[in-house]
Image (spheres, helix red, strand yellow):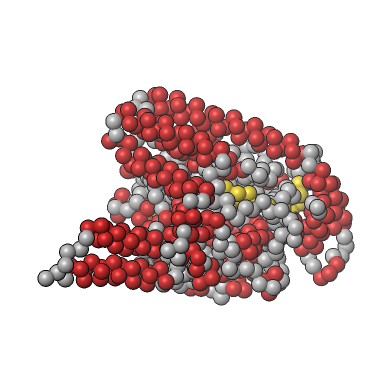
Amino acid sequence: MVAPVRPARLSLVLATAGLTLMVAAPLKAEEGDYSFWQTLVNLVSPPKADNKVTPAQRTGTYPLLANPTGFNDGFQPGRYDAWQTIQLAPSTGAVCGDGSPFKFFVNRVADTRNTIIYMEGGGACWDYASCSGQSGIRGARNPNGIPDDYMSLLNPGASLVSPFVTRVSPFDAVKTQGWNMVYVPYCTGDIYSGDRVAVYNDPTGQAAPLVWHHNGARNTRAVVSWLKDNLPRPTQMLSTGCSAGGAGSLTSYHPLRRDLAPTRSFLIDDSGPIFPTPKNGNPVDYPSQPLMSLIRSAWGLDQPNGPLPYLASGLPQFDLNELGSLYPALSSKYANDRLGHTHFWKDLNYSSYSYERFYPDIANAPDQATKEARIHARWNTDTARLRDRLNGLNNVGGYFPQYRALNESHCTTIVDFKNADVQAQNLELKHFIDSVLDGQGKVIDASEQDDKADKAKPFNLLYWLVDQLMG
Amino acid sequence: MKKVLTLLVPCLVFAAAVLWWTRGDAGASSDATRPSSAALDTTSPTLASLQATPQAQAHRDRQHFEADAKDFFARAASLGAVERSERADALTRQIDTYEAAGGLSAGEALLLRTALVKATVDDPARQMEEVAAIADRYRTHADRRMAAFAAQQANDPRFLAYKTREAQVVAEVMAMTSVPSGLTRDQYLRQRLQEERERAYAP
């Protein structure tokens, strides 16, 4: 005979058990997320840094330097879900191309340690014309520095915002949307990689020389230093960006990943390739050789203890005579990380930067169609070689769709993750992103053969809008 | 038997919950993720007081906004015209509020507003007009702010002082026949200019 249980007591017991389970279980299942309770605590008592810069890291080549004591960096630890401007003092080594102070932006959340580092794109420069911001030539973003309210301005960079760094994307969901976000603006024209104060003379002789700080390598170090001193160590971290930001995320991945020391780390280089190119390779076979040769000098990449020797010192397989060896070098050094590279075969932006000013047959092409065909031909040569290289790396995927009617088919991950499909393999870009961020085994490799299906797609209002904004 | 189950089930649930919690937050160091003992005591009023803080309320509001926006964009096509319009208006007000407070970047807000137009306006020509008007508004604001920033920079005495010294130091270093401290000319120039910036921007 079992005694009946009083309904009121049963309800109370079940309610208690249910509440216990609800508050004890994390809100999400992602590695690195805080529990519900801890999130509530974090909201009133923000978690502190637990991976601070060590004294040894404050010295040596490319040290991690802090703002001086008493300097107001603008950070409010308890201000969540809002973009905060982080000021970096000159003594951190950070500076914009024009000599104005460098700053970056943080959007913090209370419920996870996971962090995305997003590097803004925006061209490149290596002489007076391209670095001075004059019209009629492809140059670099933000030649006059970064305003404090940059994130609230619809600058071209903001109009190309990626679903990776939007909290509420109307079009795509990706797990980084719930992470701490770090937006690194671009103002040095050197794909975040240079370390040289260039003095560019006005070719007309009319204006004073342009003093330009190709300071990307040191700016990135200053950002890493601040992150280590102010935020918890990421459990998961994605380093990404498009165009110059993609290239920057690739070239800075090793020091960034080493020093921030996430448990799980990911890289997605969107449309910032470093093509396999021997230092003295024949431009007929290696079309990016003239560009690479020029920037190595203009940005001070090869100087003693400079950016490239510094990278090579930590990446045994990185061959300074062939910069595209960075992919296998990272693959080998970080065999448990998942890395990806993506760009369009019909990219007409990064390709124009790469070849337009280096090949007279392009500069002097009789018409636009011929010019574009000559650019595409060289891009195809470079891309095919990169695709083949990435195919051989298990933890580095290469994803190469053909064409999108947006921003000269430049950048696959901006605005939305749509229309970067590889129809023949029934793949969408999101499959590739998921393979990097959540996959197992070999990261997806995919390459599209032709652009017929892409060009047959209907008008897209959103893309039209963005192209209008880009002017 | 029923009584035993009644007691056993909550105990098992409680034990599972405790085990789940005590595993710690994955990948996190213990001191950074463990709540204080007070925060864990469900019999104390701490949990209730934590949930009642303005910060917790703001957090819930934000999560509700994000969930509501995602739900709206996912189901807009299947909603009735009145509900769709009302929810779009409510979202617009929230976008205004969060954008003004820095909770949405300009690019993010623009994408949301564009998506709202797509979801609520059927006529393609009107869609283009409304989206173009939104873009114009943002562009005008950005142009005005960038002009203000340029003016501010051009009149910033610290920046002006630095730029004056920058030109002098560049001329001096470029004219040197030998560079001190065993540095290359580029390294020395960079170092000198950083020192000038530290001086110009010293508090």
Left or right side of B142 for A30: left
Q: Quadrant of residue A230?
A: bottom right
Residue located 70% across and 64% down the image: A65
Q: Quadrant of residue B137?
A: top right
Residue A449 screen position, x and y as percent? 35, 52
Horizontal side of B194 relative to A255 (left or right) equals: right
For residue A181, say whether it is visible: no
Question: Which residue is more in the foreground, A176 or B22?
Answer: B22
Q: Residue B144: x percent and y percent? A: 65, 32
Which residue sits at x=47%, y=37%? B94
Q: What x and y, as percent, mark residue A356?
A: 57, 46
Front residue of A234 and B87: B87
Residue lying at 14% horizontally and 69% vertically, measured from the top left: A2
| The N terminus of chain B - image quarter | bottom left
> At 38% across and 34% down in the image, what residue appears?
B87
Looking at the image, is B112 positioned above or below residue A87?
above
Let me know if residue A210 appears in the view: yes
Q: Is residue B120 left or right of residue A335?
A: left
On the image, which quarter does residue A68 sit in?
Answer: bottom right
Rendered position, B114 above or below A185: above
Q: Residue furthest left?
A: A1
Report the number of numbered marks: 0
Relative image position of residue A437 (x, y in whole percent): 41, 61
